[in-house]
Image (cartoon, rainbow, N blue to C red):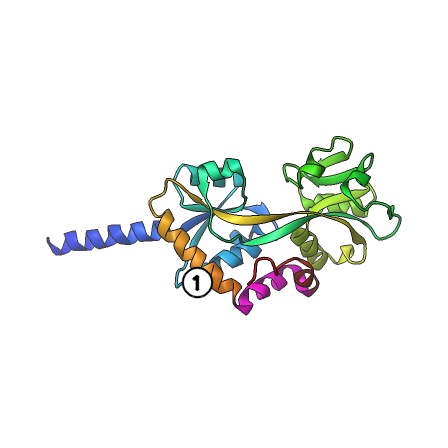
């Protein structure tokens, strides 16, 4: 083989290796993954980058809307995507690592003043108005209760703004998202209180069943995530995004050994 042919083989191998380290991530779910100044940022982004860095790997993230993230991972065009909840339907199409990125509860939030104190369980919301982002699940008890007046919004920030202006009585929101906005929006501080804690949902990186590099990549990720969770770095990432109060309040003990 001539020098040119040898270099061509090296380049082809390098390209294939590089492609195996490209992951997809959704682009509009702060604080987990969103776009800022043209690049992917967020709590999940930091966790995934740090997990791979723990095993000596740098990754490239391709940021797209979540439905495309699912479709192109399912087809095998990319080896993995995040953030995903696990279900029977998802298990049919994807592989999941041993551990989630984190676990997070759904919350019902009301105003600190003028909110009915007797709202202590999901059934107490019947006949009341609750804002929530369209398409986000909060557990069967809430999702399937047709007596709750649900107002679907474009995002969690819109829901909180509606509550702050008393246009709705309550908001259903992920706990990390709630603490993120308390940290980043001074006008929300001391305005809201948690009324109900709902079901806890593990959030994962999901891997393609069709991509040839899935097995090796998922093994590296599992090892790196385990190392990260055993270090101070994991809690530091959480605190960076939701603040010390949020980091203490969310349930990290169930995912950090």
**Towards the viewer: 1 or 92:** 92
* Label 1, residues with CA under 10 Å away: few <14, some 14-19, many ≥20: some
In the image, residue 175 lies at what x, y percent?
Answer: 68, 52
Q: Does the rendering let one see residue 42?
A: no
Q: Does the magenta stretch include residue 5?
A: no
Residue 63 x %, y %: 49, 47
Left or right: where 254 falls relative to 185: left
- What residue would you read off at disc 1? 53
Instruction: Write the start and end of the magenta stretch as one range.
Output: 231-244
View extreme (bottom): residue: 232
Name the main secondary structure of what is drawn in magenta: helix
Taking the image as shown, residue 130 lies to the left or right of residue 180, namely right
- Quadrant occupied by the C terminus: bottom right
Look at 52% across and 37% down and name the residue there.
88
For label 1, the SS is helix
Q: Residue 99 appears at what percent x and percent y?
A: 51, 53
Is residue 248 something that shows in the picture? yes
Q: Position of residue 108 (x, y in %)?
A: 75, 46
User: Left of 178 or right of it: where is 66?
Assistant: left
């Amino acid at each position: 083989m001539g020098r040119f042919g040898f270099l061509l083989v090296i380049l082809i191998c390098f390209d294939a290796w590089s492609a195996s380290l490209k992951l997809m991530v959704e682009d509009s779910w702060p604080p987990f993954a969103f776009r800022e100044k043209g690049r992917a940022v967020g709590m999940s982004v930091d966790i995934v980058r740090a997990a791979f860095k723990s095993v000596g790997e740098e990754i490239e993230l391709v940021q797209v809307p979540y439905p495309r993230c699912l479709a192109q991972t399912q087809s095998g065009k990319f080896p993995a995507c995040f953030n995903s909840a696990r279900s029977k339907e998802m298990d049919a199409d994807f592989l999941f690592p041993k551990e989630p990125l984190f676990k997070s509860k759904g919350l019902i939030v009301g105003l600190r003043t003028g909110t009915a104190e007797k709202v202590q369980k999901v059934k107490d919301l019947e006949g009341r108005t609750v804002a929530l982002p369209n398409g986000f699940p909060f557990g069967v008890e809430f999702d399937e209760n047709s007596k709750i007046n649900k107002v679907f919004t474009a995002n969690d920030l819109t829901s909180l703004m509606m509550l702050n202006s008393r246009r709705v009585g309550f908001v259903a929101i992920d706990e990390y998202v709630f603490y993120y906005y308390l940290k980043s929006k001074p006008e929300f501080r001391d305005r809201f209180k948690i009324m109900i804690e709902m079901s806890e949902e593990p959030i994962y990186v999901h891997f393609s069943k069709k991509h040839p590099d899935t097995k090796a990549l998922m093994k590296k990720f599992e090892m790196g995530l385990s190392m990260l969770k055993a270090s101070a770095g994991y809690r530091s990432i959480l605190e960076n995004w939701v603040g010390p109060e949020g980091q203490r309040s969310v349930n990290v003990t169930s995912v950090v050994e």
